[in-house]
Amino acid sequence: MELARRRGDVELVSVDSMQVYRGMDIGTAKPTRAEQLEIAHHVINLVEPSESFEVFSFQQAVTTALAGIAERGNRAVFVGGTGLYLQSVIDGFEIPGRYPQVLAELDQNPDTVALHGQLTELDPLAASRMEPNNRRRVLRALEVTIGSSRPFSSYGPGVAQHHPTPVRIVGVRLPVEVVARRIEQRYHQQLNEGFLDEVKALRAGPPLSHTAAQALGYRELSAYLDGVESGLATPTLQEALEEAIGRTRGFARRQRAWFRRDERVHWLDAQHDPMEVFDDLYTIADEHWSEPRS
């Protein structure tokens, strides 16, 4: 935000896979309405939580946003941390098709680890890139590998095969223990801001799509509300909160690993004075944007 304020020619493009959903504001830490009015934001509040929104949809939305930003003579800054979404835009890659019959057959097997073992046999590279218990990703990789008769890992450049790009990637680095503490603090703040009421409102509407249901914190708080409505004492709000914090810390760990593999990332140490970090970011942006556009 401060970079956009200071330059005056910057518009922000969200690269968060969950901020596209309307009504999922507090839990996804969307920019406030005031911030959105002050600085143009794109690729947020695009679809209802009952609708699926995946990489291909994101690519289309970003393409439209970038065209408008360019027409206005402004610069785009991608903000967020969904590595696959960012990579799909700056590197570009082929999106595999859907094979619903194959997926339906695979989904009959409740043993996700066994499915991951099957993927290891068919596409060991894809299997090595995901957690054995990440059912959604394992099923998707198997669906494509079996349905297309082509390894899932053959789609897209992969994080170790980057194409030249005019984009400058900047990451903010903090000690693991600081990130863990901030995650816990953020959940408590979100609860104070009405996160639980937000989940209640979502539960009153249509069921969440399989993509929206992956949002951190929502599933755990919904499980707590299930217990309240059924008269059960479990999980307690504290237990649900601890589960959400743990899952979010795991996501942060995988996020760090993803971006560390990208040699293009310029890392800034965020332990220093925030204004020093901003000054470094501003210098990087100024140098990058002073280069001739290709």
Image (cartoon, helix red, strand yellow):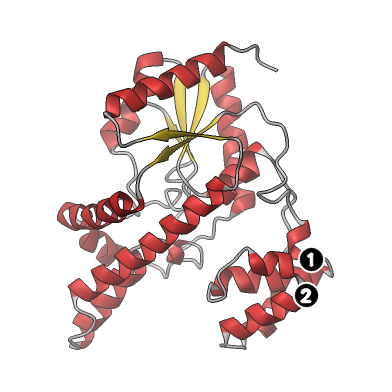
Front residue of 178/148: it is 178
Q: Is residue 73 visible?
A: no
Please tell me which residue is depicted at 41% across the width and 63% down the height of the picture.
250
Please tell me which residue is depicted at 61% across the width and 13% down the height of the picture.
291
How busy is the neighbourhood of tag 1: few (under 14 within 10 Å), some, or many (20 plus)? some
Label 2: which secondary element:
helix
Question: Identity of the amino acid at label 2?
Answer: Leu
The answer to whether residue 73 is left or right of residue 221 is: right
The answer to whether residue 148 is left or right of residue 247 is: right
Which quadrant of the rendered structure holds the C terminus? top right
Q: Residue furthest left?
A: 192
* Residue 122 numbered mark, or none: 2
Question: Identity of the amino acid at label 1?
Answer: Pro
* Residue 151 numbered mark, or none: 1
Q: Quadrant of residue 115?
A: bottom right
Q: Along the polypeptide, which appears first: circle 1 or circle 2?
A: 2
